[in-house]
Image (cartoon, grey):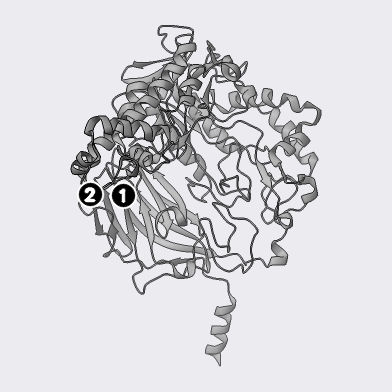
Amino acid sequence: MRLGIMLLLLLSFPLAAEMPLAWDNRNIVRSNENGITVRPAGEGAAIVEFRTGEPWPHIVLKPKKGSSWDLSRFREISFDVENLSRNRQCEIEFNAGMWSGGYLGTAILRPGEKRTFRYRLNHGTGAGFSPLFQASFMPQGFTGGRNVDTSKLKTLQLISSFPLYCKYRLSNIRLIGERPRQLTEAEFFPFIDRYGQNMHADWPEKVKSDNDLRNLQKDELATLKPRIAAWNRYGGWADGPRLKSTGFFRVEKYRGKWYFVDPEGCLFFSRGVNDVAPWGFIDKRGRERCFEAPDELGTDGSHIYWENIGKKYAKELDSWPDIQYRRLDSWGFNTVGNWSDMRFYRNARLPYTLNLPFPKCPSLDGIPDVYSVEFERGMENLLKADYAFVIGDPMCIGVFLGNEFRFGDNTAIARRVLKSAPEQPARKKFLAELQEKYRTIEVLNRQWGSDFASWEALRPVEGRGAEADLRQFSIAFVERLLVMSKEAVKRHSPDTLYLGTRLMNDDYFQAWINRLSARYCDVVSYNLYPLGFERFKPNGLPDVPVLITESTVGHGTRGTFGSITNPGVEPGARNRALARQLESAFSHPQIVGIHHFKFTDQVLTGRWDGENYGFGLVDITDTPYRDFLETNRAASEQLYSFRNGAGVFLNLP
């Protein structure tokens, strides 16, 4: 009888606060057995060492017993990590399952640092009804996005981005807290209030009335600071050395590190923000049940951030750009980045970078066909009409043409061309070159090891026989793209820097595109999303200046469903991660700037491609993440002195 009562009492208590996760530290899968070593380091611990430059090296943890873990009752998962390197940062991406499908978060540590990281589990089972949308991150209990079936989780994957070398001790993996009760359908709908916020979450800054919006604005405006005293009107280092002044931005290597040099001749490091704009469309079509006030969203939906600032600024809405300039000065930013409202480019009061659109022309998977007549004609007058204001503008740091093309390996463009339609200009060009070289299809077949009946039948083939031709055409295609882009800029505005095509992860490891970009771009640009840039070293890239044109530090607060580069749920985690990221970027000899993506959080139900990340400087109601921005300001105050070797960078607890 007494035993039965004890069991009943035990079962009536909530889940234990913590429970160790049993994993097999003697059977860890490695993506590269030569470049990665793992050895047990006591019960539930292992020492992992990477000596490899391969893309996305990783290890995979498996259960100690059975084929899967059941994590479905728990709220969070926690890892203890110690960076065993004395002089290198350590960065780890944690995934529930394989790759980013079950992304949990990212850890970054200074040399010798030991810290506990906690991430919210993304439960993908239990709701039993549709939330009426699909996005990158979904509410707890719904299928899709980064949610996984946590009741039958077979693996945990740990990826080390761009490591070259890192060594860490992993231990004390444990499950924390009880998973919140799953809401019923009647309880879940609606879940988005009239301000675009999550109705099922609460936080101190949550807006509950129009008066809250106005009071938050009044309070914020009273606390805004002036521009950093050591900066000149461009955001360059007024207290630093003076180099040659040209009246425009240029680049120069100074004491072993690359810099922009501003129009006054001051050293300039571009700390920018992308998408400073009042957008954020929230689509209500077929989702009316999701919203507290669907009738306020128009016929199809609305730009909810625009609606919020309309209520916040009221009759002073036209002053929104002016206040953003004050904010950026106060928060420690000196550049308006890509995708921003055109008002920040025309008659600019801060330096800016701008993406110029390619002319309308035939394309290959989104890459303009550089052999089309429309491309050639359009590039002749690229800076006229809508973008003539760029010509001779000293506030323009430089311009991009193109964004995240995913060029692939040095035969990929030619393979795309061979798959294209007969009328594709690039295909006609490639076939003409092959016909001139081989004369007959029979000769080409002998070289390629193929059996095409005619030139018109040409398609991509495997094997080494065709590689030289595919490589030659691919490289010539991209070289023409870069050359014509640079010429189009310099033809009308010779002092404007050409910043390239904003390369991304896929091309970071492609030596051929990195070399071509270095040859023709004044500054090579990359959109990359690690938390640290200490190990930044793209394959084949020589010693040239580099601009990180998109990067971020995410969060999962204020009712958002998740984010990339999420540093965890511990208090201060986002601030520490930002400090680590900026420390690594500020000290890197090739990096001349890093731009945060983006100004606002994305809408809960996702933009056109489903992205609904929490990574803004402000939330959807225009309320700033103040502690994060105070950290950015403190970092920027140290920017130039630290980059030039003075002092210790922010050391946040």
Residue at the spot 63% in from the left edge and 63% down from the top edge: 130
Placement of 152 over or under 380, stated as above or below: below
Numbered marks: total: 2
Can residue 427 be seen from the camera position used here? yes
Instruction: From the top left corner, tell me how far across and down residue 609 is, in percent.
Output: 56, 46
| Front residue of 347 and 407 | 407
Farthest residue in the bottom direction? 1
Q: Secondary structure at mark 2?
A: loop
Residue at the spot 27% in from the left edge and 59% down from the top edge: 41
- Please tell me in which quadrant of the rendered image residue 425 appears: top left
Q: Amino acid at mark 1?
A: Pro
Q: Secondary structure at mark 1?
A: loop
In the image, taking residue 179 as reference, residue 41 lies left or right, namely left
- Please tell me in which quadrant of the rendered image residue 219 appears: top right
Residue at the spot 37% in from the left edge and 25% down from the top edge: 480
| Front residue of 257 and 386 | 386
Instruction: From the top left corner, tell me how far across and down residue 522 is, in percent.
Output: 39, 19
| Front residue of 50 and 304 | 304
Instruction: From the top left corner, tell me how far across and down residue 30 is, in percent.
Output: 27, 56
Placement of 400 over or under 31, stated as above or below: above
Q: Amino acid at mark 2?
A: Gly
In the image, taking residue 374 as reference, residue 303 lies left or right, namely right
Q: Residues within 10 Å of mark 1 (few under 14, many from 20)?
A: many
Can residue 493 be seen from the camera position used here? no
- For marks 2 and 1, the one nearer the N-term is 2
Quarter of the N terminus within the rendering: bottom right
Instruction: From the top left corner, tell me how far across and down residue 288 is, in percent.
Output: 74, 55
Q: Which residue is mark 2?
A: 35
Residue at the spot 53% in from the left edge and 36% down from the top edge: 597
Marking on residue 472: none
Whether label 2 touches label 1, CB < 8 Å:
yes
Q: Which residue is mark 1?
A: 57
